[in-house]
Amino acid sequence: MTSLLSRIPRPATRPPSPFGPDAIEVGPRAVRIGDGWCASFAIVGYPREVGHGWLEPLTAHPSRLDVALHIEPVSANIAADRLRRQLARLESGRRADAAKGRLGDPDVEVAAEDARELAAGLARGEQKLFRVGLYLTVHARSEKALDAECARVRAVCASMLLDAQPSTWRTLQGWTSTLPVGVDALGQRRSFDTDALAASFPFASAELSASQGVLYGTATNGSGLVLWDRFAQDNHNSVILARSGAGKSYLAKLEALRSLYQGIEVAVVDPEDEYRRLAETVGGAYVRLGAPGVRVNPFDLAPGPRTSESDALTRRALFVHTLIAVLLGGKPDPASTAALDRGIVAVYESVGITADPRSHTRPAPLLRDLAAALESDGDPAARTLAARLVPFTTGTHRGLFDGPTTTRPDGHLIVFSLRDLPGELKAAGTLLTLDAIWRRVSDPANRKRRLVTVDEAWLLMAEPSGAEFLFRMAKSARKHWAGLTVVTQDAGDLLGSSLGQAVIANAATQILLRQAPQSIDTLAEAFGLSGGERAYLLGAARGQGLLAAGVDRVAFTALASDEEDDVCRTGIEQTLDDTPDL
């Protein structure tokens, strides 16, 4: 290659510069910089339509490739004047062809249509015009390798319908245009409107169509950021399935924290006391069920007249039926169910509560009152049912129900911790907290975007009545502008029952983290995983997973700042991370 500029060697007495190469040799097609070669290209042709993150094939190119995007805003007056002249030229050419009997040029027709749409958007203030230059610089260790690498990059550009022209005889200007100094020495600009420029944002992920929402992390196979807005989907629910230790609770906490950034109210059912630091950091409410003096009365009714809840008493009676079934480990037989229904009606009447909403302000009865009503019933089935409730009324498990509700938390984040509850009451505690959350979500007087996270949902799915309640919540959450997140390490509990499968079917967002070999076949069949996706989930590192949402599917790695990481890690995780390797 013939040198246009003389090679400038570095003096032997000068130390190497940390800010640039020690020598530059400029040729007509390439530049030799230090001990490497580079060639630059200017993009002069673009496709008519592009999707979000359309630049990712270039930014994620496996070899070294510098991509520079120069943006210059154009004032509205100048943009309108240019569009007016462009429309005049296109219309003049179209009329000239028509007058001479020639067929219209399809490219001209399309260009005129695009110009008219852009002019209308500018007039309404919906769009702005920008002059954009896109330049590429390919690097290689040798001149021969550079030719092969340039051919690969041009092939990628051709697959994207981009016309990449080499900066022949302007190689130095091409290289400097891709340096991070903001200098456009080539001046090959193209007009972009706001939508086209936003789709060119270099950190967007091409696999996902969302341009806003919660940041989950970085794409595993590229440099794009994975953003997803669950509230823009057909329903707002999600499921997170992973084996123990794969980072599912970490991801759920990270999503909850970033949802709070956007003003979304968050409620969490926390079986293992993992969300306490999050609640303390953001000033949320923290309720420890099972702690001394903390009680929940399942008979509570919403106070005050609410015309939309004229059947509140009936709904509460049905919930008590569900709770008793969970406490007893299954639905009672028909005779016991009938006796229970009579007892619920009688115990509400005994305190003066009727279907009239004005009576709902009176103190609600307690579980022990229900047991007493069943005991006084002449039906043997009622007395048997009362005997089975003894552990929860006067026995060892009475602490949760032995009195009126002690706390009614409020705030932007509410965490219900179930760690202090005995194992026999965890499913019932989960059900009680979900009921309290659901009454808040379904209140028409306080409608806002909400996120409800149920961690370790297998505790509730193991109980048929609890699974039914979770299914009803998944079906109805969208109507109240709420999203349900079901987090579990036991995928079999979800996929092994029709209700669990229905919960997954009603989740538009599905996240799969590292999986166990024993469950991968079931998951692959349920989610239609390819062979590569199966292998990825089996070997995924902690925090890596697959986000599936309809036709969109992307592998990602959870990404958190140091401050977010400290909030989202549990105490045991921090202890293990701080322990030095032996």
Image: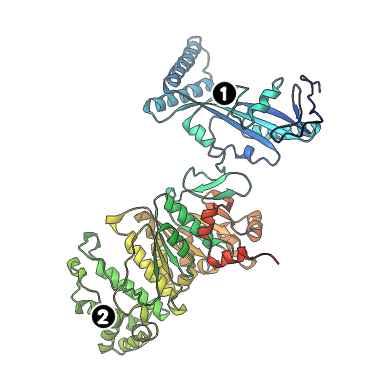
SS label for mark 2: helix
**Picture residue at 44% right of the left edge, 57% below the top:** 237
SS label for mark 1: loop
Q: Which residue is mark 1?
A: 189
Q: Is residue 483 left or right of residue 352?
A: right
**Residue 243 seen from this side:** no
Q: Is residue 120 left or right of residue 318?
A: right
| Quarter of the image where one finds residue 155 | top right
Q: Does residue 283 sit above or below 64 in this rendering?
A: below
Q: Does residue 91 sit above or below 460 in this rendering?
A: above
Q: Is residue 539 left or right of residue 495?
A: right
**Residue 24 seen from this side:** yes
Say which label, 1 or 2, has the lower sequence index. 1
| Residue type beneath disc 2 | Arg
Taking the view exactly as shown, the residue that stands out farthest to the front is: 13
Locate residue 223, reporting x and y percent: 61, 44
In the image, which disc is placed on residue 342? Answer: 2
Where is the N terminus found, in terms of image quarters? top right
| Closer to us: 527 or 130 | 130
Where is the C terminus found, in terms of image quarters? bottom right
Q: Is residue 509 left or right of residue 350?
A: right
| Residue type beneath disc 1 | Arg
Locate residue 568, reporting x and y percent: 51, 59
